[in-house]
Every structure is written in C-alpha cells, then in structure tokens.
Image: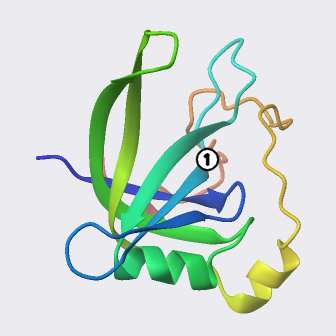
Amino acid sequence: MNKVILMGRLTRDPEVRYSTAGEGQLAIARYTLAVDRRFRRDGDQQTADFIRCVAFGRSGEFAEKYFHQGTKIAVEGRIQTGSYQNKDGQTVYTTEVVVENQEFAESKASADQNANYQPQAAAPTAPAGDGFMNIPDNVDDSGLPFNF
C-alpha cells in the first residue's frame, strides 16, 4: 500500500502549468510543504521536512486559485519516485507526493494571521526528551486512560 497523509504550510505559491496532452487542458500544480517534525534528534538543527507535491486536474486548479505561501493544508496521496538525465548527463532522482485529496487545515482567520509565514530550517525548540509528558505525583491514576 502506498498512502501518505501530510499536514504543513506551503513554502511559496504553487507553480501551475497546463498540459495540452489529450483532450483539453490539464492543470498541473507543484508546491512544497514544510512539515514540522515531531521530535528533534541530537545534533539535528532542521525541525521541518520540505516535501514536494504535485496535484493534477481539478486539484491543481483548486491549488492555483486558493493556496498561497503560508497556507496550512492537509494532503492525502501517494509517493512517486522517478529519475531523469540532467544537461550534464548525470542521473537525478526525484521523490514527490502525487496529491489525491487536499484541504485547508486551519480557519480563514488563522490563515490571515499566518499570511507572512517564513519556514525556518532551524527554529529554536525545547528539547524533546523521551517524548512523554511527566505526570505529577499528586494526580489520581484512576483518571488516566489506561491501567497497569
């Protein structure tokens, strides 16, 4: 099974081209999502992954019309790999998400506040530790959603 679900912000406005192959025109929108990492590894300064996405047809037209830099979206699709020869004769390998479904992941008001979003490769964050929240000693265990 090849299925990907991502949530992130567009690093810039989608690039849209139209293909005339076959009947009519087909919109092809390409954009990059900055997807925050959940945890930070020792010595790793990058806190987000930048994932290339491509949307075809109506999804591409929707991206062209409504998406812009900083928009937070959720994407569902599949990973596609490929390769090509560049002008120097070297093989270049590509990986991208072919979008099957995309939608807004925040309200219009939140989007307006984040209109000037600039992704940062090394945003300061608190150390992740082991990823678990410390439970104070005075908390009653019966309120927790699991038993030991």
| Of the pair 140 and 44, the residue shown nearer to us | 44
- State the image coordinates of residue 41 (x, y, percent, origin top left): 62, 20
| Of the pair 99 and 38, the residue shown nearer to us | 99
Residue 43: name its quadrant.
top right
State whether residue 96 appears in this view: yes
Residue 96: name its quadrant.
top left
Q: Secondary structure at mark 1?
A: loop
Residue 138 position (above or below residue 25): above
- State the image coordinates of residue 142 (x, y, percent, origin top left): 42, 63
* Side of 139 where 29 appears, left or right: left
Residue drawn at the location 63% of the way across and 69% of the way down: 72
* Side of 119 where 8 appears, left or right: left
Rendered-image quadrant of the C terminus:
top left
In the rendered image, the residue lying farthest to the left is 1
Residue 58 position (above or below residue 56): below
- State the image coordinates of residue 23 (x, y, percent, origin top left): 21, 80
Q: What's the residue type where badge 1 is placed?
A: Ile
Q: Residues within 10 Å of mark 1 (few under 14, many from 20)?
A: few
Residue drawn at the location 44% of the way across and 9% of the way down: 90
Residue drawn at the location 67% of the way across and 14% of the way down: 42
Residue drawn at the location 20% of the way across and 71% of the way down: 22
